[in-house]
Structures are given as C-alpha cells and as structure tokens.
Image: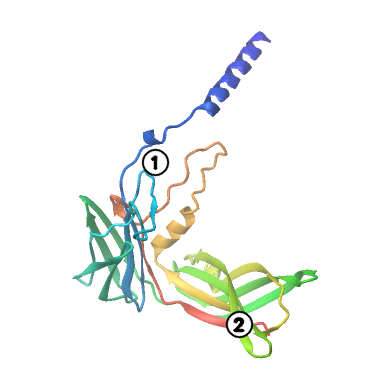
Amino acid sequence: MKLKLFFLSSLLLIFHYGCDEVINDTNLPYVEKLVIRGIVLDGDIVDSLYVGRTLPYEENIGYSSSNNTTDRESYVKDAAVTISVDAQIYILKYVKGGYYKNDSLFVKTGKTYRLHVEWNGKTADAVTTVPETPMLDSVNVSYKNIATYQYGSQNEYICTGYVRTKANDILSLAVKFEETEIYNDTIKYTYGYGSGSTVQKRTQTDNSIADILTKKFTYFNGRTTSIDQRIVFTLKNYDEPYYRYYLTSSGTIGESNFSIEPKPVAWNVSGDAIGMFIGASKSVTKTYRLQ
C-alpha cells in the first residue's frame, strides 16, 4: 500500500512541475526559410508568385501608420526568381508585397514548369505540371427544409456534379449559393455564400469517385423578396502535389491520442524553403437555378 502511495505521489509531482514549467520564447529553435506560394493556372500569365521568409517566434512585428507597412516584413523584395519551361527560362520581376510576375509567361496544360528562387544564400526549387481541364457534364441539386423560424427558414442542399476525367486527376468541386433580391420594385441586389471546396482523387481502381462529386451545406434564408436563387458549381483540376498537401495541411496529429508531433505538411517546394508551387486547370462552371 505504501509503495502504491509513493508511486502516486511521485506521478503527481511530475505532472505538477511539468504544468508549471514556463518556456522562454528565445530558446525556441528557429531556422530562417523561404516561403513560396504560387499557382500556375492554364490560360493565365504568371503574375502572383509570392516569395517570403519565416520570422522568429519572439520577433515583434509592429505596424507603422506612416508608411502603411510593417516594421519588418515577412516578404522578400530582392529574390532572384525564374521559371523554366520547354528549355526556356523566364525571369520574374518583383511587383509589391512579396509578389513576382512575368507578363510573357503564358501557362498551358500538359507543360511542366520548374521554379528556382535564390535569396540571401538560400534556394528554393519546385516542379509542377499543369493538368487538363476537366469536363463537368451536368449538375443537380436536391434540398429540404430543416427548420422554419419566424424570420426565415434553414435548408439543407446536396449538390452533385457529374464529371468526366482521367485516372489520377485531382478534382476540386466548390459550390456557391447566390441570390438576387429586389427592393422598392426597382433596386436589385445580388449576394452569395460560398461553402468551400471538396477535393477528391480519381484512382485507377475506383473511377466512380470522379464520376459523381458531392458537396453538402446548410443555409439560413431570412429574406422573402428573392427573384432569383441559384447554385454555381466550380470545378478545377490540380496537379498531384496539391492532393498530398490537401491531405496533410490540417496538421492532424498521429494515431495515438497522446502524440505531440503533428503530421508534417507535404510541401512540394524543396531546398531552404517551405510552401507550394502547383499547377491548376481552368475553372469550369455550371449554374443550377432553384427557382
């Protein structure tokens, strides 16, 4: 009995000192890395590739109203940024806010783009291939009333898109509820509610996952003067690295409930950097009218 009490007392002391321990910010490990964010989109020029850097945790970033910038910005203004495709190298020029562009670099499906960034002795590299535009054959919406209140009702919408794609395509389906109202018999006002996107991969063995993509959401409608209600479907195809990033970006912890190590994010940028450089197809849209 004494042995059990001694063990319990020791365990409580461990938890006591563990909970009271104060961690000093200055002792946290820090390695400066480049931060890359960019999407090469079919049919567009490359005009918004972001290059930044990580900052120490303890560093205070103050806001200056005089120049409308932070005292120490996280973005990088003087990086050497290039993208190569078909044995041709394009130099990206700095614009503002960490963004770089090249007005002559037009993105096309099926092409592979290689990014290279150099700054302050650090490098970042990434490769992406722009996928083909998917085909959204048709869309359908079913909905039902969940609750009715004095000032409106709440409905559940199930939105389905029928898609024709190839195996291993990474599909993103987003839906947006849009509504137009009329005031005083003359003024029209349109607003929208987006419910985010659902990302799925069509595999070699299960093609049905891409044949039918489903998105469900609920919406409270407190207005009674609507003259037009519709749901807009937006379908896009991404390169394979985006799917790996999508699966890990939530930072889910390991299988054990006591795990303290988060699942690492699957960046596709290598070198002294983190971030994503991904290819995407054109957006395909279809509209389903509810009235």
In the displayed structure, 232 sits above or below 67; it is below
Q: Residue 6, how many percent across, how many down?
A: 62, 12
In the displayed structure, 286 sits above or below 120; it is below
How dense is the environment of label 1, judged by Cα within 10 Å: few (below 14), some, or many (20 and up)?
few
Q: Residue 242, how many percent across, how many down?
A: 42, 62
Q: Can residue 135 be seen?
A: no
**Label 1 to label 2: alpha-carbon separation:** 46 Å
Amino acid carrying label 1: it is Glu
The residue closer to the viewer here, 113 or 94, is 94
Q: Helix or strand or loop: what does disc 2 sit on?
A: strand
Amino acid carrying label 2: it is Tyr
User: Which residue appears at 26% of the width and 64% of the height?
Assistant: 114
Residue 132's label in the rendered image is: none
User: Which residue appears at 31% of the width and 43% of the height?
Assistant: 31
Q: What residue is disc 1 on?
A: 58
Q: What residue is disc 2 on?
A: 189
In the displayed structure, 216 sits above or below 227; it is above
